[in-house]
Image (tube, rainbow, N blue to C red):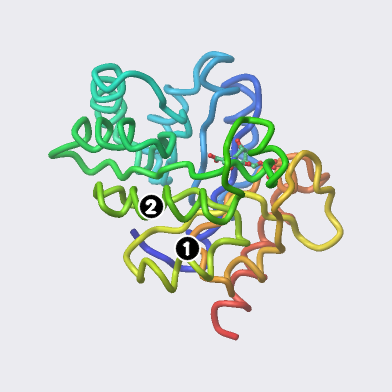
Amino acid sequence: MQTNARDRLITALDVPSADEALALVDRLGDAVSFYKIGMELVYGGGGLAVAERLVKAGKKVFLDLKLHDIPNTVERATAQVARLGVHLLTVHGYPQTMRAAHAGRAGTGLKLLAVTVMTSYDDDDLVAAGYAEGVGPTVRRRADQAKDIGIDGLIISPHEAAALRAALGPSMLLVTPGVRPAGSAVGDQKRVMTPGEAIRAGADHLVVGRPVTAASDPRAAAEAIVAEISANLTA
Ligand SMILES: O=C(O)c1cc(=O)[nH]c(=O)n1[C@@H]1O[C@H](COP(=O)(O)O)[C@@H](O)[C@H]1O
């Protein structure tokens, strides 16, 4: 996978219909080369068709379905996703789930990302969910398990990127949502950094939704993020 500045921005197409998604893609034009399609667009109808269309148009596509089920179901669902020709798929970072997805994508080009701890969570949220450990140790545990199983990359917040890059080496893809250009609304995210900070921390790809999709000029917003990525890659 190329890692030029533009390919490092993954724009989350969090819109409710295929028509809105394709209109946004049209508006963004060549400013965006990599898209994430998630639950809203898939459940809204047409998300998988949009994914296939974008792949045919030469865009890179990350299908964010966050699979988590019994192993048989995860393995078979992953094999079906691989048939779509998308580049990345998320599964939850539980060992059983990761092993099943790894088996399901065998022999295909699909890369798997393990979701570690959602970027909307802090230590208190993990305690409320029944976990004994805080964010740092939980992310680390899941990252080590993902590496052992042969998962290609991790969904983490930018806050964990530097430590994981040092611990896991250069080949593990580090993909960070929880990215906010300076001055933009944080919303429901809790562990955030700016695009430049995330890149300097070692992130390979930044997932950005609302700061692009809700901007009055989405193309200009995407271009500004790509410029910030570029400046920090060469800094
Ligand atoms: O798996 C993800 O993509 C994901 C994991 C995570 O921990 N946090 C997170 O925000 N995301 C996704 O990244 C995108 C972030 O969107 P914004 O908060 O609008 O930039 C959304 O599509 C989320 O579903």
Q: CA distance from mark 2 to mark 1?
A: 10 Å
Q: Residues within 10 Å of mark 2 (few under 14, many from 20)?
A: many
Residue 198 x/y as whole percent:
61, 66
Q: Residue at x 67, y 62 (%)?
A: 225
Quadrant where the C terminus sits is bottom right
Instruction: Give the residue pinned by disc 2.
Output: 153
Query: SS at mark 2?
Result: strand
Residue 138 x/y as whole percent:
51, 48
Q: Is residue 194 left or right of residue 72?
A: right
Q: Residue at x 43, y 73 (%)?
A: 166
Residue 170, can we see it?
A: yes
Q: Is residue 17 left or right of residue 35?
A: right
Of tags 2 and 1, the one toward the viewer is 2
- Does residue 70 sit above or below 189 in this rendering? above
The image quarter containing residue 230 is bottom right
Instruction: Give the residue pinned by disc 1.
Output: 204
- Amino acid type shown at disc 2: Gly
- Does residue 115 sit above or below 201 in this rendering? above
Most distant residue in the front direction: 132
